């Protein structure tokens, strides 16, 4: 996939991307709305010791024993672990300890900081007293040490007592805590930005995965890869005219431009032997092969060619009703094939110059047999001689064989694929069916293409008329 594929996917599935961004961003932002503001205050402790071990004292300040003493002193409703989580002691070289306390209440943050510091001073005093007593007991238990001293006059030895000089650390509070007035900065903005970034990436990823799992055709490569023939035309998505006749006289109509391009490509599909009798069919029902056949006929007639559109779907015909003609009543294709009417009597004129219609006629019980009969070959040959182009609006390829047998006696077939609806597998199966009867696949038509598929709708702005400039 290249960058254009990603852009196309995002354009097509922008709703999925947008919903993902909104959900992730809200998920990152909403918790901050229910988070209470946190206040921070601090105290400063001075440690007087001949051998300061500030890191050790910092560990004691964040210990559960000191936390429990503070909780008991203040009567707090929390566990030692919860209190310790909001206390941070940092050594400040060389004899200072900076104690920070956070809490949702500014007054409680001050009380905890002051009480914690006072309890730490008390604890250190207790430890100092214990150390002094232990040192004195150890000194009394030690026997006098006899040290060699050659300078003594009598025995040459002197008796001295070892003095360990136990001077414990002393801690004092240099700076008491104050009541903080402003809460700590929240991470709302950061969470929103992070949510937008993560949501956008996740949304694009979901869109790509969804597109990868989508088995329908949406671009030129997909159509050409499945049918093994070039894409002859792309018509843009236009809901207002998707089931109607395109006005070829409107030079600004993207649909008109699309069918004129289809007409041109079809005329030059084979320069040596261009197709004049064409079957237009889709793999499955509801993929607009009938309206494609009709508008192709209109486009050919608009160029001055005599055209006959044949309603060859003898099961669910739609072309005649689109033109306002009752195709299932009176003489039609089925009547001619069954010998109940003459071809000349069944052909109807339309409101479009150079365009005629051979409606379906009464729906027969055996459409495939009628279309594959010798009479059908005669009808095709007669229509070829009478008109410049004959366009058959055929039945779907997969459910029935009607269009396949008709394609075998025509110059070729156009396979119609509906953007985002026709499955790739069905398109490939339709091509296999046509080749199985020896039919020539002239090309494919992708109808209802969204903007960005490089259909004529891409050039809508260019097709708009420009006002003459004045000097």
Image (cartoon, grey):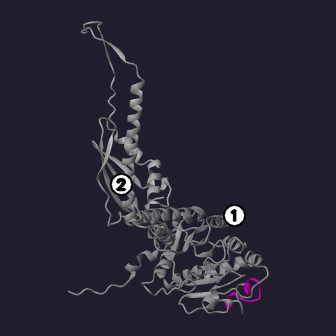
Residue 389 in sight here = no
- From this viewpoint, which residue is outermost toward the left? 471
Does the image show residue 110?
A: yes
The magenta region covers: 334-345
Q: Which mark is residue 59?
A: none
Q: Helix, strand, or loop for circle 1?
A: helix
Residue 104 % position (x, y): 41, 64
Drawn side of residue 32 relative to residue 319, left or right: left
The kind of secondary structure element at disc 2 is: strand
Work out whether 79 lies above or below 10.
above
Q: Is residue 38 above or below residue 143?
A: below
Task: Work out whether 53 lies above or below 42.
Answer: above
Reading the image, the residue beneath label 2 is 100
Q: Residues within 10 Å of mark 1 (few under 14, many from 20)?
A: few
CA gap between label 1 and label 2 equals: 83 Å
For the residues labelled 1 and 2, say whether their Cβ atoms are less than 8 Å apart.
no
Look at the image and tell me in which quarter the C terminus lies.
bottom left
Q: Disc 1 marks which residue? A: 436
Q: Is residue 335 magenta?
A: yes
User: Residue extending furthest right?
Assistant: 365
Q: Position of residue 251 (x, y in %)?
A: 42, 84
Circle nearer the viewer, 1 or 2: 2
Between 254 and 62, the residue placed more toward the observer is 62
Q: Relative to residue 272, is residue 406 drawn left or right?
A: right
Which circle's residue, 1 or 2, is located before the other in the chain? Answer: 2
In the displayed structure, 332 sits above or below 25; it is below
Q: Does 429 lie within the magenta span?
A: no
**Number of other residues with Cα within 10 Å of mark 2, as a class: few under 14, some 14 to 19, many 20 or more:** many
- Residue 186 at x, y percent in the picture: 38, 64
Q: Nearer the viewer, residue 217 or 119?
A: 119
Task: Identify which residue, 3 or 210, lies in the foreground.
Answer: 210
Q: Is residue 64 left or right of residue 468?
A: right
């Amino acid at each position: 996939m290249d960058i254009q594929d990603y852009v196309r996917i995002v354009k097509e599935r922008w709703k999925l991307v947008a919903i993902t961004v909104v959900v992730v961003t809200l998920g990152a932002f909403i918790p901050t709305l229910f988070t209470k503001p946190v206040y921070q205050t601090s105290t400063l402790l001075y440690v007087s010791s001949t051998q300061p071990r500030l890191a050790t004292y910092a560990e004691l300040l964040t210990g559960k024993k000191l936390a429990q003493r503070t909780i008991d002193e203040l009567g707090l409703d929390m566990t030692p672990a919860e209190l310790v989580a909001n206390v941070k002691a940092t050594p400040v070289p060389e004899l200072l300890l900076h104690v920070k306390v956070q809490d949702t209440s500014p007054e409680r943050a001050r009380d905890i900081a002051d009480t914690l510091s006072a309890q730490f001073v008390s604890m250190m005093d207790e430890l100092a007293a214990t150390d002094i007593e232990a040192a004195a007991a150890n000194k009394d238990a030690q026997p006098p040490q006899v040290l060699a001293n050659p300078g003594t006059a009598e025995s040459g030895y002197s008796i001295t007592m070892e003095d360990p000089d136990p001077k414990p650390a002393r801690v004092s509070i240099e700076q008491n805590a104050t009541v903080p007035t402003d809460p700590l900065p929240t991470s709302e903005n950061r969470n929103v930005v992070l949510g937008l970034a993560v949501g956008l990436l996740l949304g694009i990823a979901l869109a790509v995965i969804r597109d990868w799992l989508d088995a329908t055709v949406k671009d030129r490569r997909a159509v050409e890869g499945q049918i093994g023939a070039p894409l002859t035309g792309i018509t843009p998505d236009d809901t207002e005219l998707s089931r109607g006749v395109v006005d070829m006289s409107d030079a600004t109509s993207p649909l008109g431009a699309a069918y004129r391009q289809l007409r041109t490509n079809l005329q030059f599909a084979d320069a040596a032997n261009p197709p004049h009798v064409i079957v237009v069919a889709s793999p499955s029902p509801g993929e607009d092969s009938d309206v494609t056949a009709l508008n192709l006929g209109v486009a050919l007639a608009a160029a001055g060619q005599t055209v006959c559109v044949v309603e060859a779907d003898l099961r669910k015909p739609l072309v005649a009703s689109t033109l306002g003609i009752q195709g299932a009543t009176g003489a039609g294709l089925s009547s001619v094939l069954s010998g109940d009417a003459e071809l000349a009597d069944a052909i109807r004129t339309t409101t479009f110059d150079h365009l005629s219609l051979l409606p379906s006629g009464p729906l027969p019980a055996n459409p495939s047999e009628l279309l594959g009969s010798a009479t059908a070959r005669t009808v095709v040959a007669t229509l070829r001689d009478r008109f410049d182009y004959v366009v058959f609006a055929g039945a779907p390829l997969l459910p029935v064989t009607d269009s396949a047998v008709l394609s075998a006696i025509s110059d070729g077939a156009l396979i119609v694929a509906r953007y985002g609806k026709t499955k790739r597998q069905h398109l490939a199966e339709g091509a296999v069916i046509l080749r199985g009867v020896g039919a020539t696949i002239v090309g494919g038509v992708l109808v209802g293409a969204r903007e960005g598929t490089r259909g004529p709708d891409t050039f809508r702005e260019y097709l708009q008329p420009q006002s003459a400039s004045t000097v």
